[in-house]
Image (spheres, rainbow, N blue to C red):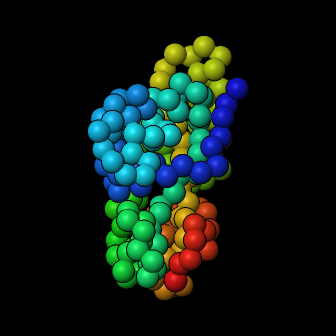
Amino acid sequence: MLVFDGHLDLAWNALQWNRDIQLSVHTLRTQEAGLTGKGRGQNTVALPEMRQGSVFLCFATLLARSTPVQVPHVDFHSPAQACASAQGQLAWYRTMERLGKLVIITSLEQLESHVHAWKGHLAGDKRENPPGIILSMESADPILEPEDLPDWQAAGIRLIGPAHYGKGR
């Protein structure tokens, strides 16, 4: 059975929490065993476990808010900072794709090809298939002006939750 996950903060975990999610969940939890703070030692996902669990596709987020609340690792003082953080997360996804760790899906044709490859994997094809991701933006704070939407779409964003994850600008 193929599994689709509707929301994973992969780049945010990699960059804001400094987690190398190419490593196993066990390894990441071991690395964080002595760290204090909410959520440390309790990561929930990593690429090896995604492949092992047949998570063939997920909505992978860009997560950066611009609010006066200032939650560490999420909120930024200005929209420009939120935009730059989201661009950094996008660069991380592209790097993982270049390394063969993920596939960024932006079209129906790519999605159909990806599903076909994973169905072959389940049928006994032993080639390693990386998980596919459909890029989403959690909060629209990184979008500086409405005129920027075509640029974000060209960058691969296919879903935006404009008011997701608490108050945003």
Identify the residue shown where x is 38% and y is 63%: 73
Q: Is residue 102 left or right of residue 140?
A: left
In this view, the residue farthest toward the right is: 1
Depicted 12 relative to depicted 144: above or below: above
Point 54% across, 74% down: residue: 140
- Residue 58, above or below 115: below
Residue 106, percent across and down? 56, 54
Residue drawn at the location 53% of the way across and 24% of the way down: 52
Foreground of the two, 155 or 29: 29
Q: Quadrant of the N terminus?
A: top right
Residue sitting nearer the eye, 40 or 17: 40
Indicate the position of residue 67 as horizontal and vertical percent values. 46, 79
- Residue 90 lies, in percent from the top left, at 40, 59
**Viewer-proximal residue among 69 and 144:** 69
* Residue lying at the far top of the rendered structure: 124
Residue at 54 percent of width and 49 percent of height: 8
Above or below — where is 160 with respect to 58?
below
Q: Is residue 53 visible?
A: yes
Q: Quadrant of residue 79?
A: bottom left
Taking the image as drawn, is residue 11 in sight?
A: no
- Give the x, y percent position of residue 49: 50, 29
